[in-house]
Image (tube, rainbow, N blue to C red):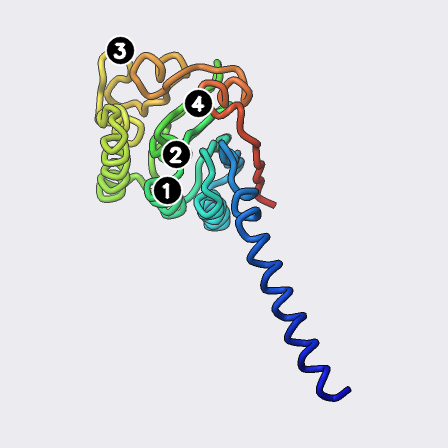
Amino acid sequence: MLKSKPAYAMVRLLFLIGAFIFLLPSAAVFGQSEAGDVYVIAVDGEITPAMASFLIRQIDDANEADASGILLEISTLGGRVDSALAMRDRMFSSQVPVAVLINDRAISAGALISIASETILMTPGSHMGAAKPQPDDPKTVAFVSGEFRTTAEKNGRDPQIAVAMVDESVAIDGLVAEGEILDLTASQALDTGYADALIADRTEALAFLGWDSASVVERTMD
């Protein structure tokens, strides 16, 4: 009896190893899909360090999951510049394409986040811009307008329009006079290339982006 237990244990171990090897290819095939999930992430409310941490974590999750795309649904009056910059930088480094849907407004820091995306979609009646910093001393204005300019340039958008959202000394014929801050309506954004399309809702946005056949993973900050 004492000699039979090791033999039985060895047989059982070999059986388990064989079963594992047999099942391994099936498990690998089962894990594949024709289209990855689409992460729909709400950027709703004030842009804060907590919001930045939330968005960065969700973009990381989407990249680790090999998602098909990321759609940010934006509704914000703005917030902290440093938080917006952290969010923008992670959007730039994402291997998964990032698009933005502005449901109503993307003001101040929200405008910078929107400009950082590869695709901007807006609902009729929405708007973006009005990013005059506080305090509005020359040094701060120069720094923030520089961040807006480089962000716009990276995605092939007119940098002067981005700067006009920050610096009231910039005038653009037909858009904003000197002494005013630019706030683009949805139709103006479309005409100037700052919006890629005007759409009604998320369903239309996903169809426009070619992501309508993918499963949607919704993420909202608690």
Foreground residue among 9 and 147: 9
Image coordinates of residue 160 in percent, x first then y, are 22, 25
| Distance (Cα) linking label 4 and label 2 | 10 Å
| Distance (Cα) linking label 3 and label 4 | 30 Å
Q: Which of the two labelled residues, at mark 4 and mark 2, occupies the earlier sequence position?
A: 2
The kind of residue tagged 4 is: Leu
| Distance (Cα) linking label 1 and label 2 | 7 Å
Q: Return the mark for residue 97.
A: 2
Query: In the rendered structure, are the residues bearing label 3 and label 4 in contact, judged by CB atoms less than 8 Å apart?
Result: no
Residue 48 appears in view? no
Regarding mark 4 in the picture, which secondary structure is present there? helix
Regarding mark 3 in the picture, which secondary structure is present there? loop
Q: Which of the two labelled residues, at mark 2 and mark 3, occupies the earlier sequence position?
A: 2
Residue at image mark 4: 209
Q: Return the mark for residue 94.
A: 1
The structure residue drawn at horizontal position 22% and vertical position 44%, both measured from the top left corner, is: 139
